[in-house]
């Protein structure tokens, strides 16, 4: 017989719980970053959208991954794997946005300090 045992296609609940914890912690850091940045007293400029949009898309993907993992169907290996891919995509978007935010701030500071007469 070439039938596969359905239990073989399930992941361990402890492993899923660890994944949920990891996703939750990194999602909290992402939300904390965007909250801190939004509360920054420096006025926002239109070019900040270059960084904000990928961060918000990344946060949305991380939230989607967490929702997928909280469903009991995520004990099925394909569902768990899909949730992990969604989460990793969210991390990539968020990290790209944070990197862009750092670069934008760096170039903004560099431009202002390079102005003639600024001392």
Image (cartoon, rainbow, N blue to C red):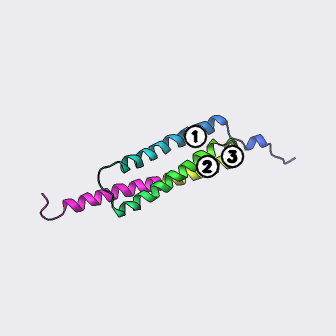
Q: Nearer the viewer, mark 2 or mark 3?
A: 2
> What is the chief secondary structure element of the magenta stretch?
helix
Q: Residue at x 69, y 46 (%)?
A: 77
Give the left or right position of residue 106, taking residue 73 as reference: left
Q: Using the numbered discs, state the Cα–Cα distance from disc 1 to disc 2 in whole angstroms.
A: 10 Å
Q: Position of residue 4 (x, y in %)?
A: 80, 46
Residue 66, position as x, y percentages in the image: 58, 45
The tag earlier along the polypeptide, 2 or 3, is 3
Q: Are marks 2 and 3 in contact (CB under 8 Å)?
A: no
Q: Could you tell me how far apart the alpha carbons at marks 2 and 3 are, in whole angstroms?
A: 10 Å
Residue at 45% of width from left, 43% of height from top? 29
Q: Which is more N-terminal, label 2 or label 1?
A: 1
Q: Do residues under tags 1 and 3 come within 8 Å of each other at their CB atoms?
A: no
Foreground mark, 1 or 3, reads 1
Q: Relative to the observer, which residue lies in front, 46 or 3?
A: 46
Query: Is disc 2 placed on a helix, strand or loop?
Result: helix
Q: Closest to the observer: 10 or 87?
A: 87
Residue under pointer 1: 20
Q: Position of residue 12 (x, y in %)?
A: 67, 37
The location of residue 74, given as percent across then percent down, is 67, 44
Question: On residue 83, which mark appears?
Answer: 2
What is the quadrant of residue 105 in the picture? bottom left
Within-10-Å neighbours for mark 1: few <14, some 14–19, many 20+? some
Q: Secondary structure at mark 3?
A: helix
Residue farthest top in this picture: 14
Q: Which residues are magenta?
A: 93-119
Q: Which part of the image, by quadrant, shows the C terminus?
A: bottom left
The one nearer the camera, 3 or 38, is 38
Mark toward the start of the polypeptide (1 vs 3): 1
Q: Label for residue 36?
A: none
User: Quick one: SS at disc 1?
Assistant: helix
Residue 77: image tag: 3
């Amino acid at each position: 017989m070439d039938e596969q045992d359905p239990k073989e296609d399930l992941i361990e609940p402890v492993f899923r719980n660890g994944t949920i914890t990891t996703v939750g912690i990194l999602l909290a850091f992402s939300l904390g970053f965007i909250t801190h940045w939004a509360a920054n007293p420096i006025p926002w400029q239109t070019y900040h959208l270059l960084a904000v949009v990928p961060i918000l898309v990344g946060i949305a993907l991380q939230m989607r991954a967490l929702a997928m993992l909280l469903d009991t169907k995520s004990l099925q290996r394909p569902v768990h794997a899909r949730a992990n891919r969604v989460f990793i995509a969210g991390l990539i978007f968020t990290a790209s946005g944070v990197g862009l935010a750092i670069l934008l701030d760096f170039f903004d500071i560099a431009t202002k300090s390079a102005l003639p007469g600024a001392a």
